[in-house]
Amino acid sequence: MKYGYAETHSPFLGALQQLRTYIDELPERLRTFSDAELTERKPGKWSRKEILGHLIDSGLNNLKRFTDAQFLPSPFVVERYNQNQSVIYNRYQDLPLEHLIAYWQSLNRQILYVTEVIPEDTLRKPVLPPDHGEPVTVAWLIVDYVAHLGHHFKQF
């Protein structure tokens, strides 16, 4: 299994701190772009607004995972969701930037409220990824979520 709590304590706490930083910095970064820059799509890629929408979908799905993994039977099984269809049907491209920012920030503040108080034994609980590869832990899932944010943060 990929990391128990003792091995992830520092990465886990670092991830929560990084999430706080993203919550503060992402709005400032996005507000530097014009409307045209926010909605511009390169072939086969999402626009900046759609990337933010994807991060909202990821946050919604992961908040549920971080919550459910605490009380559902072990190992918790991570279910996939259709990322492309979620971006399309939530119409992120058409929504005002300030709405998207507020939604994303609020969602990630809730993720912090939930994750920062998860007990150590729960952070060590096994989680099966969607491909049912090697089990990971709840802590790993949270660290991975923040790493995913970091990957997309670089695209803004």
Image (cartoon, rainbow, N blue to C red):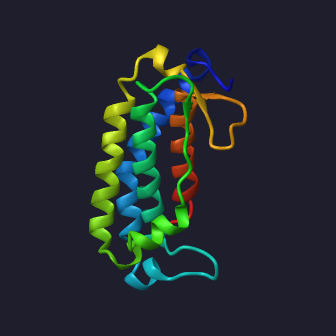
Question: Can you give x and y, in whole percent of width and height, for residue 138 in the image?
Answer: 52, 28
**Which residue is at 54% across, 21% downward?**
125
Residue at point 34% right, 32% down?
A: 114
Relative height, residue 150 to residue 19 (above, below): below
Q: Is residue 77 above or below residue 44?
A: above
Viewport quadrant of the N terminus:
top right
Left or right relative to 131: residue 123: left
Comparing 118 with 61, the one in front is 61
Q: Quadrant of residue 78 in the image?
A: top right
Image coordinates of residue 127 in percent, x first then y, are: 58, 30
Rendering coords of residue 9 (x, y %): 53, 21
Q: Residue at point 54% right, 67% down?
A: 84
Q: Nearer the viewer, residue 92 or 36?
A: 92
Q: Quadrant of residue 115?
A: top left
Q: Going by the image, does 91 lie left or right of 15?
A: left
Left or right for 2, reference 91: right
Residue furthest right as drawn: 133
Q: What is the number of callouts on the image? A: 0
Does residue 77 sit above or below 8 in this rendering? below
Query: In the image shown, does 127 or 112 lie closer to the viewer?
Result: 127
x%, y% of residue 155? 56, 64
Question: Looking at this rendering, what residue extends furthest in the bottom direction?
Answer: 36
